[in-house]
Image: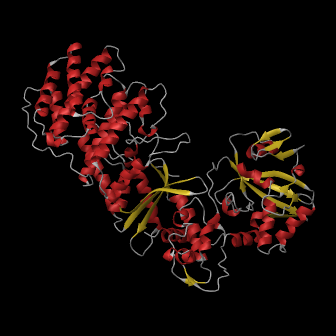
Amino acid sequence: MNLPQLTAKIGQAAKQEIGDSSELAMLVKPLNVDGDHAYILFMTIDVDNQEIRFEEPIPYSESAPYQYHYFGNNSAAGMQYYVTREANSAHYLLKSVFSDLYLVLKKHDLLENELGALLAEMNQKKVIHLGNKKGTGTVNLGMIKGLLSAWIDEKNNIVVDGTTRKAEDFLRYVLQWENKDDTFALVVPRVIYNQKTIILAQHPDYVAVTKKEQNLEGTSNNKAEKFCYICHNKSADVSSELTTKLSRSGINKIFATTTFNYAKNIDKKHYDDSYAICSTCFQDLLFGEKKVTGSFSARIAGERAFILPEGLLDDFNYNQLTALKQGADLFFKKGLAQELDDQLETAMDDFTNAEAYVIHFFIYRTDGNSVTVLKTIEDVPTMHIVRILYTLGKQVEKLSPHIRSMSLNTIYRMIPVRTNKSGDQLDIQRVLSIYQSLFSKTTIETNVLFGYAAEAIEKGFREIRKKQGSQFTNLGWQSFVPDQEDFYFKRLTMSYLCLLQTCQELSILDRDVFQNRGVMKVDLSGMSKNVQEIEAFLEAQSFDSMPRALFYVGVLLRSVAQAQYQKKHKTKPILNKLSFQGMNQREVVWLYQAVIEKLHQYDKMTMENEQYIKMFNHYFGTIDESKALTDQAHLFYIMAGYAFHPPKSSDHEGDANTQSMDEGNMAVTSE
């Protein structure tokens, strides 16, 4: 995969979609506002009357960012010369924006033109003050109509008539705007001079200086022609310096390295040979980044992600890429049940008919100033994704009714992820590595999955039991507070069974877990309906002797827990005898003996429990010591048996059976 080429192709398609209506369209930032209650506000700098007014709000439209050239906020190190701002960034317009614009015009020898002369006249009339360096200019706040006094503090708050206000609150105060449902989307400066109104963002000199400052003109001081890294054409405007103009938080930053370690012969002077691009491709990258941010962004496992389909043939079908991205979103969000809904079925058809495409996943974090790539999963065939989904659905059907659906997001809800005080997920790599193995068909260690399962059982249980849990929220334990941990165990163990079976079906486990190797059959005639149901389940899942024995320990454990619950011991003290970190074979036997003792104590040695004991002894007595399981696997199979039939007396059972693990903290959501 060549990421910059793909981004540039997407940019070319986006540029054709927009047309030539705006020379700076690739720089325009999208706004997430409620169009029905959003307004554009004009900041009128009336040089003729030496007055500044915020006035004439007009309804916001989707074309407004293009019409008024809204580029967001400049980077911290750059000149703050962008004149159209969001309302919550309006304080920039009261500080150095006009002065920095003057300096940028000076830098590119444009001061003698109309815009430079206008700014000089505004300075002469003391409406603004032009500084000699970045960030030193100001606006004369004393000229703002309707204010007695105003100044800006160190935190960029505007102190108005003795009251400290945020930027948007300041605008409401000036306008006396009382409807709090309304918002101001953009503030657009305009100047009245010699009875002529000039919108600065639309002025030809502003467009020209922005193109020069953002290297959009295709001019270069290079004497020799060079090859562009992206289009492979040779021209004089090719330079690696253009990569420094790319956004520090977008997809282009992923490939635009700032080190020289990848240059030819690891020589600094050869860096330009490896990463130089032409101005045309630079513009395509800007358009592409804008389109990727708007149409190909998502969240996977609570982290930001780009989902980029790519055609393997020369033809480029942008609509197909969009459909495949939306399908990938859907596969994470939607659970695979026995019957597909229309939306999911359509997405499956799109993927099935797109054999000449692959999907790339980029999971990353950004603080707005830099990008940290957490995981890249490249070149995933669309047909392999379909196979994963069908395999999950097949296992869901085998586990029904104990599990109703399974999505790719469910995996995120199964593996404990700790967060720090800032909300950053500290060990998210364990989840992303499972996704990578599924998509890339690389081996997963079975013991790792059993370890995650044991940890998830323990962590969720501990959080449910706390007065106020706060960690591992991705596990979804919040739905089972205060004392519904049995349903949490059921949801978790059945989901792990589904995942393990799916991985084995896809041949990505390091060993086969479900083989049913030489299990001695039992005559079930005369056995209770529950025993027959359990045996049918164990047979369908191809459990070996040891997992079956452990499963029955869990079933007996549940009988004791039910008895304790009926005795008003809501914490079910028998669960304290479990070692959630894992249990070796000796500890399993000790637990079994403790369970038998408690059954006698609570007078629960019923015929059915005696049959469970018989089944345990049958399977445990035929165990091959050479095929011993790990301590975590022991615990998992015990808890699977415990959760197989949660108490039916709780009304929560129906909710637990039907509640999707995709609720709450979604693994994938559109940005």
Q: Using residue 254 as the reference point, say whether residue 77 is left or right of it.
A: right
The foreground one among 164 and 86 is: 164
Residue 80 vertical placement versus 21 (above, below): above
Q: Using residue 294 as the reference point, say whether residue 165 is left or right of it.
A: right
Residue 623 vertical placement versus 143 (above, below): above
| Residue at image coords 54%, 65% | 252
Where is residue 69, by image quadrant? bottom right
The foreground one among 599 and 149 is: 599
Residue 385: image location, x then y, percent:
34, 57
Colouring scheme, one of rainbow, by chain, secondary structure, one colour: secondary structure
The answer, for residue 650, to whether it is visible in the render is yes
Q: Residue furthest bottom?
A: 224
In which quadrant of the rendered image does the N terminus lie? bottom left
Residue 81: image location, x then y, percent:
75, 62
Residue 103: image location, x then y, percent:
80, 67
The foreground one among 90 and 584 is: 584
| Residue at image coords 47%, 30% | 469
Q: Using residue 174 as the reference point, say whether residue 493 is left or right of it.
A: left
Q: Using residue 339 as the reference point, say whether residue 543 is left or right of it.
A: left
Residue 41: image location, x then y, percent:
76, 52
User: Total of numbered circles in the picture?
Assistant: 0
Where is residue 180, by image quadrant? top right
The answer, for residue 653, to whether it is visible in the render is no
Residue 197 vertical placement versus 299 (above, below): below
